[in-house]
Image (cartoon, rainbow, N blue to C red):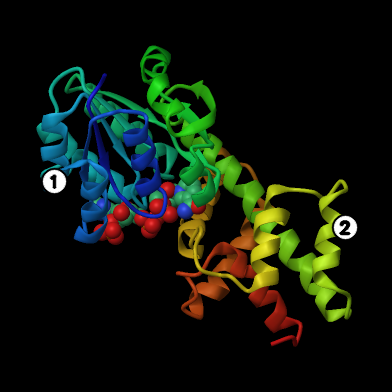
Amino acid sequence: MQRIGFIGLGIMGKPMARNLLKAGYALVVYNRSRPAMEELLADGATLADSPKAVAEQVDVVISCVSDSPDVEAVALGNDGVIEGAKSGLTFIDMSTIAPATARKVYTALKEKGIDALDAPVSGGDIGAQQGTLSIMVGGEEAVFERSRPIFEAMGKNIVYIGEAGAGQVTKACNQIVVAMTVQAVAEALTLAKKSGVDVAKVREALMGGFAQSRVLDVHGKRILERNFQPGFKLNLHRKDMNIVLQTGRETSVPLFGSAQVTSMMDALLAQDQGELDNSALATLYELLSGLS
Ligand code: NAP
């Protein structure tokens, strides 16, 4: 069995790493801050003190960190994967980053004989815990096929999309749909609340009809229960919308809805709400509607 390294043990990375351990893989982990590493040590992982040290010990390195500069630092920076990897290593980035950065990382690693895949995920913290993530993959198809058993330990819907960067383009599309669906659910439930109608019953009715969605289910419940602990942080979703809008500009595609919901996210970030779950979009609707 291949030996795997995992870098970035946050809300997503920690349960994903645990699922690899459960599947029987020997795991070497690195996290920038210490506490998450201690948890994985208790679960049976080996600790390393840098991405370079991870790469020196394994056949496959997975990263799940925050943003494009973070992936660049982990993969190509000082003490990065590129410094510790032997030729033939596979680097799989499962963060959500700009397609252009994914292509840059792919090219830089390829020059050193390292294969790279961009493999962002959807399904949230619940999908990460349950091993039911949707995984969208860019890179060489042969490298994808060779890595399929690793993806199967973390996800259920595993789709090879195309060449390097194609996974991240897919994730940008995913984030458009999620952002505007969260907005639609927040808007609808605010209207119900201001109209004096039972919001829980509205959600229940909508769940059985054409408006049914995972967002109405999970985020609708969060809004009802006032549970805005992440989940998926608003500042990370705002980061993804930047990738969406940037990709729209690069391809000359007008993204009217994305621009609007991004401005709503900005209004919440201006109130220091970026660490809340993205379902907290509802609180802005409530404020603007005189409900809070
Ligand atoms: P998170 O809880 O904030 O975790 C981020 C992780 O990245 C932490 O382990 C952090 O280390 C590490 N990190 C950040 N910058 C780093 C750097 N420069 N060098 C080394 N490590 C660094 O975020 P998350 O929710 O797990 O999200 C991770 C990625 O998955 C993001 O790209 C996000 O957009 C994507 N994603 C998230 C969800 C979701 O529902 N949460 C769903 C799909 C995709 P520290 O512990 O030291 O801060």
Amino acid identity at mark 1: Ser
Can residue 246 be seen at all in this image of the molecule?
no
| Residue nearer the viewer, 227 or 71 | 227
Residue 56 in the image: above or below residue 38: above
Q: How many marks?
A: 2
Looking at the rendered structure, which numbered label has been put on residue 50?
1
Q: Earlier in the sequence, mark 2 or mark 1?
A: 1
Residue under the image location 20 percent in, 17 percent down: 88
Q: Is mark 2 within 8 Å of ligand 1?
A: no
Residue 257 in the image: above or below residue 153: below
Image quarter hosting the N terminus:
top left
Q: Percent x, y for residue 115?
A: 28, 22
Q: Percent x, y for residue 274?
A: 47, 70
For the residues marked 2 and 1, what is the alpha-carbon distance in whole angstroms?
Answer: 51 Å
Q: Residues within 10 Å of mark 2 (few under 14, many from 20)?
A: few
Q: Is residue 105 left or right of residue 133?
A: left
Q: Is residue 6 left or right of residue 264?
A: left
Give the image quarter of residue 145. Answer: top left
Residue under the image location 49 percent in, 54 percent down: 242
Amino acid identity at mark 2: Ala
Image quarter hosting the C terminus:
bottom right
Q: Is residue 109 left or right of residue 134?
A: left
Q: Is mark 1 within 8 Å of ligand 1?
A: no
Looking at the rendered structure, which numbered label has been put on residue 205?
2
